């Protein structure tokens, strides 16, 4: 703890993107850890500890949601990636850990190693047929923007992008201006 106080005396704020400061929970307990030892047992210290614990719980839930989202998008929602089957294990009840997690995991691994059917159901892929038909290497040319875009998914993203919409709007404006100019010219020749 003395290195934290030394850092504070040097007027250097902690950088929570480097070293120990990026550890899960360190940022949440920073205020409590900076209290002098005699103030940690005071009412303010206890309140700060409770606040830190609640902040830690919230950060852990956020982290778990991000991890779940990453696993789903990387493994279950990816149309072109060949991945092994993914199984969900219920880890909420620690008293049932051996039965719900350990034994199931061992059975799943054994069935994979022996190339035999698994008695547990794996998670289904979330990739719809439409997504799986997208070609990642196809060439798509946008006539409006005069750009070559590789990949069907990227092309669909491009078609709904602000840049593409701006080009369409500008072309529409130019066409309208050209039409007005043409009408003026025909009126002058008459």
Image (cartoon, rainbow, N blue to C red):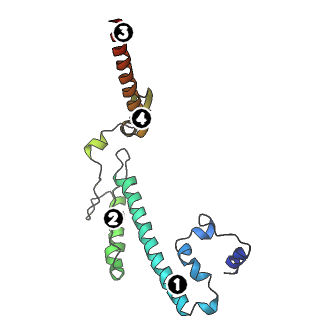
Locate residue 57, reporting x and y percent.
Answer: 44, 76
Tag in front: 4 or 3? 3
Identify residue for label 4: 166
Q: Quick one: label 1 or label 2, which is nearer the N terminus? A: 1
Q: Earlier in the sequence, mark 4 or mark 2?
A: 2
List x then y, in percent, for residue 180: 35, 19
Q: Secondary structure at mark 1?
A: helix
Marks 1 and 2 sit apart, C-alpha to C-alpha, by 44 Å
Q: Around disc 2, counting alpha carbons within 10 Å, would you say few (fewer than 14), some (14 to 19), or many (20 or more)?
A: many
Q: Is residue 151 visible?
A: no
Residue most extreme to the right:
10
Are dots 1 and 2 in contact, CB under 8 Å?
Answer: no
Q: Which mark is residue 108?
A: 2
First reached walking from the N terminus: tag 4 or tag 3: 4
Q: Are marks 3 and 1 in contact (CB under 8 Å)?
A: no
Return the disc, 3 or 1, that comes first in the chain's sequence.
1
Q: Quadrant of the C terminus?
A: top left
How far apart marks 4 and 3 lie (CA) works out to: 33 Å
Find the distance from the CA under tag 2 to the CA under tag 3.
83 Å
The numbered disc on residue 188 is 3
Among the 4 quarters of the image, the one containing residue 136: top left
**Residue linked to disc 1:** 48
* Mark nearer the N terminus (2 vs 3): 2
Q: Is residue 168 above or below residue 182?
A: below
């Amino acid at each position: 703890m003395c290195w934290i106080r030394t850092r504070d005396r040097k007027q250097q704020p902690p950088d929570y993107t480097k070293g120990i400061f990026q550890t899960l929970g360190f940022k949440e307990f920073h205020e409590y850890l900076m209290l002098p030892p005699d103030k940690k047992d005071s009412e303010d210290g206890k309140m700060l500890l409770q606040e830190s614990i609640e902040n830690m719980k919230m950060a852990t839930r956020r982290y778990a949601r991000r991890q779940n989202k990453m696993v789903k998008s990387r493994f279950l929602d990816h149309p072109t990636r060949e991945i092994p089957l993914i199984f969900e294990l219920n880890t909420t009840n620690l008293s049932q850990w051996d039965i719900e997690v350990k034994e199931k995991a061992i059975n799943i691994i054994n069935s994979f190693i022996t190339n035999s059917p698994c008695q547990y159901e794996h998670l289904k892929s979330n990739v719809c047929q439409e997504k799986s038909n997208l070609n990642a290497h196809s060439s798509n040319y946008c006539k409006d923007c005069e750009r070559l875009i590789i990949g069907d998914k990227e092309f669909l993203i491009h078609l709904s992008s602000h840049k593409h919409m701006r080009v369409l709007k500008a072309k529409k404006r130019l066409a309208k201006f050209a039409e007005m100019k043409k009408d003026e010219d025909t009126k002058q020749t008459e």
